[in-house]
Amino acid sequence: MAELFYDDDADLSIIQGRKVAVLGYGSQGHAHALSLRDSGVDVRVGLPEGSKSRAKAEEQGLRVVTPAEAAAEADVIMILVPDPIQSKVYEESVKENLKDGDALFFGHGFNIRFGFIKPPAGVDVCMVAPKGPGHLVRRQYEEGRGVPCIAAVEQDATGSAFALALSYAKGIGGTRAGVIKTTFTEETETDLFGEQAVLCGGASALVKAGFETLVEAGYQPEIAYFECLHELKLIVDLMYEGGLEKMRWSVSETAEWGDYVTGPRIINDNTKAEMKKVLAEIQDGTFAKTWMDEYHSGLPKYNEYKKADAGHKLETTGKELRKLMSWVDDKA
Ligand code: NDP
Ligand code: MG
Ligand code: MG
């Protein structure tokens, strides 16, 4: 059984006794910096001169310095810039400012797991990764609640790295909801697999294939959109609340029968064999290397895929339909 930690298991005074640098002020960065500050922690935000985020952080009452200045002042450095540029930020601004006993924090294990960042032996290396988008992390904190987090220690130089990670998680509201202990390896590999095979990749491909099948058979795209995309949310909400059982309890017996007999024809042994290959490519670093090569060569294929899907009939149909659905809120 996974180890879970709550407010009573975490000592907020540990992080209150440290100087924290939050590098980046995007989705996660703004949530961490503001909530830590509101938890009585000494926080500075590290952003380059000319960064678009600077004005926002300053307006919200935070002190903004360059990433190198932030790393030099602080003894806990949380890196919340996009994963593909973290190693550059580390090399340019963090590395030379790390002292023994400092702690390097991450919101995702990618750069440590695949060796793009190699911290010196004298620093703690921790992860506190909220299991939700940054704007929700902040909103929940303000409402006295929290988003569950996972926490890990890759390198425990001081012998008290996990207590520090829990204390940090408490500062952003994570221990109000619960913190699960993991490792950098487990977090990184399961996160990449989940988003590729199920959540983003698997779900988009399933929706697209279903929509195309109906439209190619001559049905109205609007009806196909409702059937294959719009209703998916309603089904997923039921699964979220009560697993497959609650979803099957709520749908008709006909839908439930179709689930049993047709589901395994769509997602079959071949799909699972491919999922195993996808997982192996994540584990052996092939995916990370391919993605970093793509990123650093200016994202040619990424932009091609993005453009192709933006023009897909599923998207153009949905765009028009959603304007007519007063009950759908497309704001973040
Ligand atoms: P965002 O893309 O939202 O944030 C980017 C921020 O980094 C911006 O403020 C940007 O500034 C700033 N930035 C860009 N370049 C630099 C630089 N050279 N030095 C300092 N700051 C810079 O990132 P996310 O919040 O999505 O991701 C941060 C980390 O959190 C990642 O490791 C991610 O995997 C992890 N994570 C993200 C989740 C999410 O909800 N998005 C969920 C869980 C984990 P500018 O305004 O100038 O562009
Ligand atoms: Mg992810
Ligand atoms: Mg139906």
Image (cartoon, grey):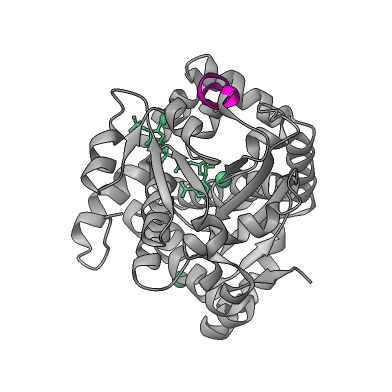
Magenta stretch: helix, strand or loop mostly: helix
Residue visible at 46% across and 51% down?
211
Q: Position of residue 184 (x, y in %)?
A: 71, 46
Quadrant in the picture for the N terminus: bottom right
Location of residue 31 in the rendering, given as x and y in whole percent from the top left corner? 39, 53
Give the magenta part as a residue range: 87-96
Q: Quadrant of residue 4?
A: bottom right
The C terminus, quarter of image: bottom left
Q: Residue most toward the top?
A: 297
User: Does residue 216 appear to the left or right of 285 in the view shown?
Assistant: left
- The spot of residue 37 in percent (x, y) is 38, 55
**How many dots with numbers?**
0
Instruction: Describe residue 314's horizontal placement relative to residue 266 as left or right.
Output: left
Q: Which corner quadrant of the image does residue 86 belong to?
A: top right
Whether residue 215 appears in this view of the structure is no
Q: Nearer the viewer, residue 104 or 278?
A: 104
Compared to residue 101, the image places residue 247 above or below, namely: below
Which residue is nearer to you in this view: 69 or 226?
Answer: 69
Position in image of residue 57 (x %, y %):
29, 42
Q: Is residue 88 magenta?
A: yes
Quarter holding ligand 1: top left
Please determine whether, in this image, residue 290 is positioned above or below residue 111.
above
Query: Which residue sits at x=61%, y=52%?
Result: 198
In the image, is residue 101 above or below residue 146? above
Residue 46 counted in the magenta span: no
**Looking at the image, can residue 298 be seen?**
yes
Quick one: 164 or 233, which is closer to the camera?
A: 164
The residue depicted at 51 percent of the width and 68 percent of the height is 236
Residue at the image position 31 percent from the left and 51 percent from the top = 318
